[in-house]
Amino acid sequence: MLGGGVTFGEDSQAGPKKPRSFEDYTPRSLKAITAMKPDPDSLRDKQDSLVVTADDLPSRVRVTYGGATRPIPQLKKEVIRQWARLYAGSVEHYTETYQSEMHFVEDGVAFWLAIPKNSLLLSKQGFKKAEPLDLYLTRLGAVIVGDKYDWTLLVEKSRKADTVQNDESWPSFDYLRNDYRSASVVAHVRTREAEIVKKVGGYEDWRVVCEVVEPFKGKFGRGGQIEYYHTAEAGLRNEWFTGEKIVFLLRHYYKPEKKWVYAALENSTLPYTKDRVEKLRLISAHPTEKPLRGVKPGRFERMYMPKVGRKITVEGVLESAKLGLVLTFDDGEIYIYPLHEAEASKMNAFDSLKGQIVKVRGVLRHARGSSAAAAGELSIPEHFYFDAAEARVIAVRPRQR
C-alpha cells in the first residue's frame, strides 16, 4: 500500500496525458534532479522501498551521448508501472514503451535514463558517442535505498544540441525568462579574453573577460567589464568565446580564494541575435511577470491549493521580487514577505541566500491579489506566499558551482 491511503491496485488522478512541446520542459541538470527529495505528499509503498510523485517535473537537460543500453532494472520497472497506474491513462503505454535504459554523461558523471523503444537514440546512424544532446524528460518516482533516492527518469524527446542553438528564433520568450530569473547578471557582451585556468578530468574551467554591450539584469552598466568562469568539456576552442554573446551569470562565494565570483549558468550562454536581445528587453522591463517557461495555466495552482493552511517544505531558487522574495520551482512560484511592517527587517536575513537553491518551511498561504487603484500603482496578482516572520529558509546548495 502507498502512503496517503492509496493502494498500488487503485487508479488515482489517472487520465490521458496531453503531448508536450519542447517549451514545456524547464532547463535543469541531472545532478540537481537526482539530488531532490520527494514531496512529503508523494506516495510510498508499505515497505518504504518505492515512492511515486504526482509532479513529473518536465525538464530539459544537456548531456553527451553514451550509446550503451541495458534493460531497465526490475524495481525501476515497478516505479514506472505504479506511476502509470496512479497518474496516467494507460499503464501499458508506459510499461511497453519503456524497456531499456541508455547511458549518458553530464559533467563527467554517468546516468542511466529510460528511453522509448522507438527512440532515434537507438539509431546507430543518428548520434555519435560524446555528441552533445538535449534530452526532454520527466521524473516518475524513485527506488529508496537508505536515505538515498534512485530516481526513475523517462526520456520523452531528444535532439542534437546544435540544432537548438543555431535556430535564431530559439529560445522562446518564456524559456529566456526562466534563465533570466535564475541568474544574477544577464547581459549582451563582447568577449575580450578567454583562457583555461584549471583542468579536472575531461573538463576545463575557463576564465572569461568581456565588455557589456547592453545590460538586462545586475549591477553592470553599458561598457562595464565582467570577469566570469565557464566550465566546459575539454577540447573547446578559444574561438567559441569570441564575438558577441548573451550570458546568464550566477554569483557565488569561492571559498579557496575567499571571494565572490561569477559563473555561467549551466547550458545558458547564447550567440547574439537581434531576436534574443529584443525578447530580453521585454523581460527586463517586466521581470516578475508570469508565466515561467512552458507553464500550463492552473497546473501549479491545482497542486498547491489543497495545501493552503498547512505547514509544507518546498525547494527552489530564491530571487528578488516586487512583493519581497520569490521561490521558483515546479513550474510555479511562492512569495515570501512580511504581513506586518514591523517585521520587515526579518527579510534582511535572507539577502545572502538570493540566487541559491534553498528549502523553505512554513504555513502556505494564498492571496487573491488586487488590481491597481490608480495609474502607475502596482497591481498584485493572485499568488501563494509564506509569512516572512515564520518561514524558515535554509540554503541547500548554489545553483551552479
Image: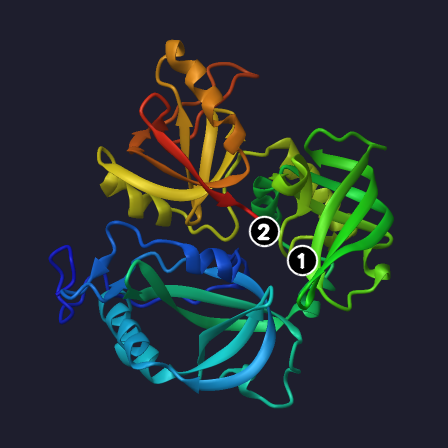
Please indicate, yes or no, whether residue 235 appears anywhere in the rendered image: yes
Instruction: Say left or right for 36 vs 161.
Output: left
Q: Earlier in the sequence, mark 1 or mark 2?
A: 1
Instruction: Say left or right for 7 vs 320.
Output: left
Q: Which mark is residue 170?
A: 1
Q: CA distance from mark 1 to mark 2?
A: 9 Å
Residue placed at 52% from the left, 29% from the top?
321
Residue placed at 50% from the left, 33% from the top?
353
Residue nearest the observer in this picture, 308 or 266? 266
Residue placed at 26% from the left, 63% from the top?
51
Q: How many residues crowd around disc 2 within 10 Å: few (fewer than 14), some, or many (20 or more)?
A: many
Please indicate, yes or no, whether residue 383 appears anywhere in the rendered image: no
Assign a secondary structure to mark 1: loop
Residue placed at 73% from the left, 67% from the top?
234
Q: Is residue 42 above or below residue 306?
A: below
| Residue ID for mark 2 | 175
Spot occupied by residue 191 in the image (x, y as percentages of width and height): 85, 47
Assign a secondary structure to mark 2: helix
Q: What type is the residue that disc 2 sits on?
A: Tyr
Spot occupied by residue 16 in the image (x, y as percentages of width and height): 31, 68
Spot occupied by residue 347 in the image (x, y as percentages of width and height): 45, 21
Q: What type is the residue that disc 1 sits on?
A: Trp
Q: Are marks 1 and 2 in contact (CB under 8 Å)?
A: yes
